[in-house]
Image (spheres, rainbow, N blue to C red):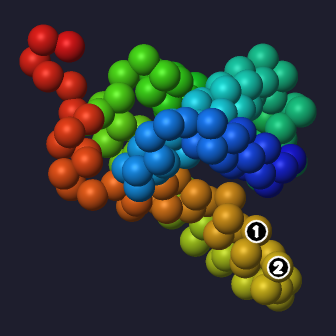
């Protein structure tokens, strides 16, 4: 499901970029990054976190531990907190994007290595599986890396913002 959401968000960002007058590398990267933060890391993760608190048995198999385990509630609250930080990128841009970027980069790097290790232990690592894991865990890194330091400084908020 998350893979299809990722594809839909990239198509939506692509349509916005195509209709935009300014198509600099920095602008394309920022549009793509904000779409991914809001749609993939924001809305979807907020729903996941709320469901994890309200009806944990629905996500029990996906999480890998019992629904009544305290760590399940902790993970759900962390997801909600990270999603709110991502949703705030709709309003705040510039230097604010660094916070959610660092948070999600660490999270997705850990998730990618955990999934690869899990598949490796079970002997189920395929080229397609690795591609799917990489695609759904690292899209925001590509968007962030497209912006040059000058472009990041130019979009940073001023003291009066």
Q: Nearer the viewer, residue 11 or 62?
A: 11
Q: Is residue 17 left or right of residue 151?
A: right
Q: Residue 122: in sight, yes or no?
A: no
Mark 2 residue crowding within 10 angstroms, few (<14) / some (14–19) / many (20+): few
Q: How many discs mark residues in the rendered view? A: 2
Q: Is residue 126 above or below residue 29?
A: below
Q: Can you identify the residue that label 2 sits on? A: 128
How far is disc 2 from disc 1 in space, using C-alphas?
Answer: 6 Å
x, y percent for residue 136: 68, 58
Quadrant of the image occupied by residue 123: bottom right
Residue found at the far front of this picture = 21
Tags 2 and 1 touching, CB below 8 Å: yes
Residue found at the far top of this picture = 160
Q: Is residue 102 left or right of residue 50?
A: left
At 31% from the left and 42% from the top, the residue drawn is: 98
Give the secondary structure at mark 2.
helix
Q: Which label sits on residue 132? A: 1
Mark 1 residue crowding within 10 angstroms, few (<14) / some (14–19) / many (20+): few
Give the secondary structure at mark 1.
helix
Q: Which label sits on residue 14? A: none
Quadrant of the image occupied by residue 152: top left
At 83% from the left and 41% from the top, the residue drawn is: 60
Q: Residue 47: in sight, yes or no?
A: yes
Q: Is residue 40 above or below residue 93?
A: below
Q: Quadrant of the C terminus?
A: top left
x, y percent for residue 118: 72, 74
């Amino acid at each position: 499901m998350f893979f299809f959401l990722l594809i839909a968000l990239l198509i939506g960002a692509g349509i916005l970029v195509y209709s935009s007058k300014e198509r600099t590398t920095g602008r394309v990267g920022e549009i793509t990054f904000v779409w991914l933060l809001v749609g993939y890391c924001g809305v979807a993760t907020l729903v996941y976190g709320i469901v994890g608190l309200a009806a944990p048995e629905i996500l029990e198999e996906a999480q890998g531990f019992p629904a009544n385990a305290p760590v399940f509630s902790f993970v759900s609250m962390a997801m909600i907190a990270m999603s709110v930080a991502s949703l705030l990128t709709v309003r705040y841009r510039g230097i604010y994007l660094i916070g959610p970027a660092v948070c999600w980069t660490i999270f997705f790097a850990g998730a990618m290595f955990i999934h690869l290790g899990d598949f490796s232990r079970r002997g189920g690592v395929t080229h397609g599986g690795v591609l799917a894991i990489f695609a759904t865990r690292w899209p925001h890194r590509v968007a962030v890396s497209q912006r040059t330091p000058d472009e990041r400084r130019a979009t940073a908020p001023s003291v009066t913002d």
